[in-house]
Image (spheres, helix red, strand yellow):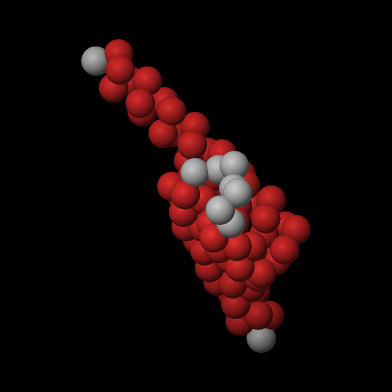
Amino acid sequence: MLVWLDYLRLSEMRRREARREAGLLIHEHGENAVQVVRAKIADPARSTSRSELRLTLWYVRDLLAARRKRQQTRRTSRS
């Protein structure tokens, strides 16, 4: 049971870290953040695991979609 709780805590920390990293990448690179994460995944000398980078890529896509949706809502509400 304790092992399961440790696993859940670790996976929660990984998700939180991936979301934070995704936010930073979007802040730095904007729409190009997806290409930056893909380049990191393709790099054989990477220091981060592929699974963590895939999770970051998922969050980058999610945050960019939310950002686009928010911008569309602002445009339509001004009209």
Q: Which residue occupies the foreground of this view, 51 or 32?
A: 51
- Residue 58: percent from left, percent from top: 47, 57
Q: Residue furthest left?
A: 1
Q: Look at the image and tell me whether residue 71 can be seen.
A: yes
Q: Look at the image and tell me whether residue 59 can be seen.
A: no
Q: Is residue 56 above or below residue 69?
A: above
Q: Which residue occupies the foreground of this view, 72 or 57?
A: 57
Q: Residue furthest top?
A: 2
Q: Residue furthest bottom?
A: 79
At a point 47% along the width and 49% down the height, the residue shown is: 50
- Residue 6: percent from left, percent from top: 37, 20
Q: Is residue 69 above or below residue 42?
A: below
Q: Residue furthest right?
A: 28
Q: Is residue 18 above or below residue 75?
A: above
In the rendered view, does 31 fall on the left or right side of 7? right
At a point 66% along the width and 86% down the height, the residue shown is: 79
At a point 36% along the width and 28% down the height, the residue shown is: 8
- Res 1 quadrant in image: top left
- Res 70 quadrant in image: bottom right
- Residue 63: percent from left, percent from top: 56, 60
Q: Is residue 46 above or below residue 79?
A: above
- Res 47 quadrant in image: top right
Q: Which residue occupies the foreground of this view, 30 or 79?
A: 30
Q: Which residue occupies the foreground of this view, 43 or 30?
A: 43
At a point 43% along the width and 28% down the height, the residue shown is: 10
- Residue 61: percent from left, percent from top: 52, 63
